[in-house]
Image (cartoon, helix red, strand yellow):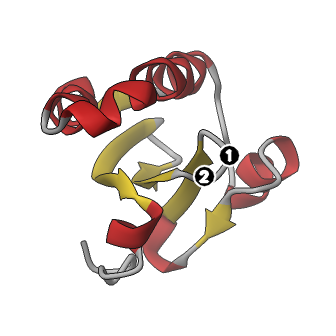
Amino acid sequence: MRIIARRTLREFWESDPAYADAISPLTEWYCHMEKVTYETPQDVKAELRTASILKGGRVVFNIAGNKYRVILAIDYERQIGWIRFVGTHAQYDKVDAESV
């Protein structure tokens, strides 16, 4: 799957020194997602049990033991995922995951 855009992840961990511990888990998540093919939301859930499936092809991923969250909008047919949000769990709680 092609993930757009890695820059969003980098901008997050560079935005505050407190997020330096996010570099490794976010990079690992990105590399994993670039290698996989998911045909359906159920495929995502089957492999990544902590992922939350939302409406509109969106999936919430728990990163680094749920310290961080990534919202990805996935076009399963074209195998493209757009990063819609990356942040801490507290920041995630303040957004509408289905509309960001």
Q: Nearer the viewer, residue 7 or 23?
A: 23
Position of the C terminus, as image quadrant, is bottom left
* 83 on left or right of 30: left
Vertical position of residue 80 compared to residue 60: above or below: above
Q: Are marks 2 and 1 in contact (CB under 8 Å)?
A: yes
What residue appears at the point 48 percent right and 35 percent down from the top-left corner?
79
Q: Residue type at mark 2? A: Asn
Residue 87 picture location, percent across and down: 33, 54
What residue appears at the point 49 percent right and 18 percent down from the top-left corner?
24
What residue appears at the point 50 percent right and 45 percent down from the top-left corner?
77
Image quadrant assignment for residue 85: bottom left
Residue 78 picture location, percent across and down: 43, 38
Vertical position of residue 69 compared to residue 63: above or below: below
* 66 on left or right of 22: right
Residue 32 picture location, percent across and down: 60, 20
Q: Which residue is mark 2?
A: 62
Image quadrant assignment for residue 52: bottom right
* 92 on left or right of 54: left
Choose mark 2 or mark 1, whichever is in front.
1
Vertical position of residue 13 compared to residue 97: above or below: above
Q: How many marks?
A: 2
Query: SS of the residue at dot 2?
Result: strand
Q: Nearer the viewer, residue 75 or 45?
A: 45
Residue 86 picture location, percent across and down: 33, 50
Q: Nearer the viewer, residue 41 or 70?
A: 70
Q: Residue type at mark 1? A: Gly
Query: SS of the residue at dot 1?
Result: loop
* 39 on left or right of 89: right
Image quadrant assignment for residue 10: top left
Q: Which mark is residue 65?
A: 1
**What distance separates the C-alpha of mark 2 from that of mark 1?**
7 Å
What residue appears at the point 17 percent right and 26 percent down from the top-left corner?
7
